[in-house]
Image: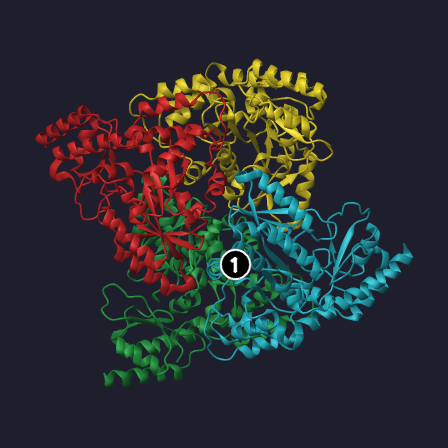
Chain colours: A green, B cyan, C red, D yellow
Amino acid sequence: MNFTSDNAAPVSPEILAALAAANDGPAPSYGADSWTARFREKIASLFGPQAIAHPVATGTAANALALATIVRPYGAVLCAEEAHIASDECGAPEFYMGGAKLIPLPSRDGKIRPAQIDAAMARARDGGVHHVLPEAVSLTQATEWGTIYQPDEIAAIAAACRRHGLALHMDGARFANALVTLGCPPAAIGPEAGVDVLSFGATKNGALAAEAVIFFNPKLADGFERRRKRAGQLWSKMRYLSAQLDAYLESDLWLRNARQANDMAGRLAAGLGPHVIHPVEANELFLTLPEPQIAALESAGARFYRWVAVEGVPNPVIRLVTSFATTETDVDRFLKLFAAQKLAA
Amino acid sequence: MNFTSDNAAPVSPEILAALAAANDGPAPSYGADSWTARFREKIASLFGPQAIAHPVATGTAANALALATIVRPYGAVLCAEEAHIASDECGAPEFYMGGAKLIPLPSRDGKIRPAQIDAAMARARDGGVHHVLPEAVSLTQATEWGTIYQPDEIAAIAAACRRHGLALHMDGARFANALVTLGCPPAAIGPEAGVDVLSFGATKNGALAAEAVIFFNPKLADGFERRRKRAGQLWSKMRYLSAQLDAYLESDLWLRNARQANDMAGRLAAGLGPHVIHPVEANELFLTLPEPQIAALESAGARFYRWVAVEGVPNPVIRLVTSFATTETDVDRFLKLFAAQKLAA
Amino acid sequence: MNFTSDNAAPVSPEILAALAAANDGPAPSYGADSWTARFREKIASLFGPQAIAHPVATGTAANALALATIVRPYGAVLCAEEAHIASDECGAPEFYMGGAKLIPLPSRDGKIRPAQIDAAMARARDGGVHHVLPEAVSLTQATEWGTIYQPDEIAAIAAACRRHGLALHMDGARFANALVTLGCPPAAIGPEAGVDVLSFGATKNGALAAEAVIFFNPKLADGFERRRKRAGQLWSKMRYLSAQLDAYLESDLWLRNARQANDMAGRLAAGLGPHVIHPVEANELFLTLPEPQIAALESAGARFYRWVAVEGVPNPVIRLVTSFATTETDVDRFLKLFAAQKLAA
Amino acid sequence: MNFTSDNAAPVSPEILAALAAANDGPAPSYGADSWTARFREKIASLFGPQAIAHPVATGTAANALALATIVRPYGAVLCAEEAHIASDECGAPEFYMGGAKLIPLPSRDGKIRPAQIDAAMARARDGGVHHVLPEAVSLTQATEWGTIYQPDEIAAIAAACRRHGLALHMDGARFANALVTLGCPPAAIGPEAGVDVLSFGATKNGALAAEAVIFFNPKLADGFERRRKRAGQLWSKMRYLSAQLDAYLESDLWLRNARQANDMAGRLAAGLGPHVIHPVEANELFLTLPEPQIAALESAGARFYRWVAVEGVPNPVIRLVTSFATTETDVDRFLKLFAAQKLAA
């Protein structure tokens, strides 16, 4: 009953097996190996031949490198106020961008709207050189609240970006979870919807430590490789990073893993009903419960994250996250416990 | 016959096995796991209880984070002009330190001398606020030329550091290789010799991607963890980083691996004789050879790195690096080829 | 009728005269001159002997250097959301601090409250290494809305800072304007109220280009001088910066200038009555007026700044700023025009 | 007899008078004033209509801003090892560029040669992403040794820059001194010789605190104004910066000032003969003298700078700098003293 985070999960057996298979004699270092080439081919077949994919080990690195490549130090990034880049990366984007700012936009469901971009740009233009210059928008797919952007919502944001000369970044730490819910091809919520650069997550969905920065707009990719190197994010034994990503995409492992995680979240949601405070569209649930009930769940062995207080929600909020490794048994044990607590309350 | 680099080598089977063993259900993320705890205990037993060890994935990250923690943005680091931090990390230390400078000191054998530190400090003091303030010295053990610092050489440098209020960093990407040659306890070329912070390498010596920053002087460690996070260097599934390091230190695997690499370098050196331009004290050899002979070796399938021209050495220079995975067969094939080429020349 | 800003004003004749007087043969460069010494003595007599004052040319430089000296790159600064450092300096604090964040706190009157600091610190602690670490609070005196902090309000904030280990910075671009309203000694809203470092403004109040960073807590001043140099903020002919500041403090010029500015703001406020949306406590007024009336004032030759829309205020908002150079004639012409427009409307 | 530096000199009376003349009522802030417009027109008439000039207060700011605008954080700048940007600005270029490196090239006379650029580029290319990417060359005119680049020398360096895709920056802290020696139009050692961006100095040659960054290649100027603002280098009362520069160029004041400085340096050189260790081509002289003679000059009241030891020069080296304010009387007093000392020795 560990629902603290999808990063508390282990590694998919297929990915561990790929590491073992890659461990066969010497190989060129720094990415000139065949695993990296194979991963890149898979990305090109999913997102189109213009897609340029660069593996890195962490999601924070992927986001910070992507943003630093498309935003200058006197620039700024518009994002939802709950965005991981704004709240949970200890200033990594600011560090990598050389001090450029994140401009948080308020949001009730984790999603930002085109009108907010228009308004933010009007304010920025008004300030002239005294204000930082927004140069990018960053979306999170799925969002921090476990909701997802529909293709047409992304396209509308991309249109706003084009109106204002902004690049569009997507933090896809849970890209696969969003994708299986939408049931569309990956490109439909990537390049076809107007996304310029994607942080393509795998760690939360079964990899050991593997993400990729994928540029759909090659003009924006200039300098990425030196930035990655000087950030200490270029692996010498790169094959072991790429082998994870290659196995992740092989035989739809990524989609199967995400589907399992989402299904388990849905099963939880179905059993928890009105306590759920956001639509459960991916693998995260947010519940509001009276404190004694939360404490009782904890002492019965359930593991989850206590969220910060949410405005307008009277009781405390907890977050449950499922993963590829979550089983029906896990879910049903939790639901049984929950029902028992409720009865007792 | 791949002698391009020790990072072209695969992963020790023991370390792959440790990854598989760690893949057992959920575990706390970000380092609150038992593998990280076990690794830290091993470090404490090797280097003393005050040693604080933080795992990271690359050597560049280890160096840049270590230096950024001990040097302020208006500061500077004294190092050998060939130092990896100065030549091969694409400005990572400068990036992490917020623009502090590396001040390269000339060196014929890769080692710097206390008198150079004294002279550099005199120059810096003379410049007052117009000059950056040296705050650290960085040594490489083994050096870029495959030579090693003796314990008393390190202690003499540490004494110079104390004279001038400098912290002492050691880039130990090949720490194990130096150690097995010296045959001393690890602490003798670390805290006991006056080193304050060590980049403890494992990747070149059998790990997949694992290094550690080890502070022997806890006063200098302040802020490291937030710096690591904001650099995108904190793994969510940290157990898979720490499990590598734990296995690396288990049953002296690290020393066995390094000994094999060093022995193979020695075997090469013995066969190549006067072409070797530096003492072979670890697992690197530098040879000077006429260009036709180099080309002939390459076309016969030998793999190595062509070095930049070395002042005072008439012929081109090549570098051969051995690893834990280098076998006597590899070495003897190369030596046979070399002898045949020479005969032909 | 130019009320656009106090930085549209000219230079006090006394300060120009001081520049001419300083222009007498050679003088030591970089601050080793007698004008700098004299200015520092005046600061010590105003704020106490422990006060260390460093001249710089702009307010943005003063703020950014002060904050960079007391906040580390992984740190953060709590400030009001309207703060100049957050909105009008194009990311200068972030640049100087190496990417540390500003955390804006909402405020209706430009002032922040101790409870907001407590709440922000609780949130930050909850986030651990994933969140930046607040290390300072920055107040603006007078605020962006022309209001002022009372000594006990500052002391209460300073107490909150001490509770949480934060340094307290004051952006005193209009310090003199606040001071003459309060009628207290300067130290009472500086070191005695718990301020650690002050950006002491003079440019808006009669200088040509001169501010000072004043550390009341010498322990926090470490490294300031190298930071100033590497920011390109150290004047070689420093005497011309210090001579301004020396003349500014001589014979209470600064207080006389500020009093004139404040008096003229009061005279405006008295004539504009209910259109004024904030208490006029220094030399700034904010008016809400129907658009046609604003346009009419503009076409009649009045100059002022159109503010961004203010939440909850139906009409557009304009800002009027007075300076030492504003005369009763200027004010009365504007009031006459205003009355005439109103009558016509 | 103060020859310590041209920045120990006072301000030209014409420039002080211009400040007083500018002090006439309100004026638009941040550069939208008529003094800035007039200065820009003068620059356009000197350097051509494409020249874009931005005033700043210090030479370090001019250099650091110019370089940050043309070099990315993973880039590098090739310069002479004695260059002010490398030795005397406490890391300002590295700070402004976000950690990009300066690559110092050895030089006996302060000048770099095209072949050094070719060699440095070959080394950089060899290193791939592991090395920083040189993106600019920076020359100093006049050099740190008081020598000057001829137009054809600059053109040859510019050709090397074009071969390698590098921008060409000139640190013209003593541009006027070089110009009067060469006797050519300013554009001949600026845009016509291939310079892309010039730090145009005035402070050392009679201004109070005024320099300008002049872009001859408008494509390289993108983002400069926001960089200047966020560096705290944008003056609110800009008219007082521009009025200095306008007066500096008015009626050839800049050339008259520089000629006086150079003439006085020539007069010194003529009297000091074989002790001078570099050609005296501008307003700096370097002398080598036995220590007792240096000490005797000092105790007789002469003021100059003791230089760092120069390789291959047996005795200590001192630097004498003349300025527009140096008189024949100053020079002749020094020469008389020098002759007397020599006789005594």
* As drawn, A298 above or below A45: below
How dense is the environment of label 1, judged by Cα within 10 Å: few (below 14), some, or many (20 and up)? some
Picture coordinates of residue D23, whole percent (x, y): 33, 22
The residue furthest right is: B343
Along the line of sight, the residue nearer the viewer: A317 or C62? C62
Residue D266 in view of the camera: no
* As drawn, D220 above or below B2: above
Along the line of sight, the residue nearer the viewer: C209 or D116? C209
Chain designation of label 1: B
Quarter of the figure that contains the C terminus of chain B? bottom right
Picture coordinates of residue B215, whole percent (x, y): 55, 63
* As drawn, B218 above or below A285: above
For residue D284, what is the image quadrant? top right
The residue furthest left is: C343
For residue C333, what is the image quadrant? top left
Identify residue type, mark 1. Leu
Picture coordinates of residue D252, whole percent (x, y): 50, 15
Quarter of the figure that contains the N terminus of chain B? bottom right
Residue at left offset 31%, top offset 31%: C7
Taking B181 as reference, is A245 left or right?
Answer: left
In this figure, which residue is indicated by the disc labeled 1? Answer: B220
For residue D143, what is the image quadrant? top right
Residue at left offset 36%, top offset 37%: C43
Picture coordinates of residue D261, whole percent (x, y): 56, 19
Residue C281 in view of the camera: yes
Q: Secondary structure at mark 1?
A: helix
Along the line of sight, the residue nearer the viewer: A39 or B284? B284
Total marks in image? 1
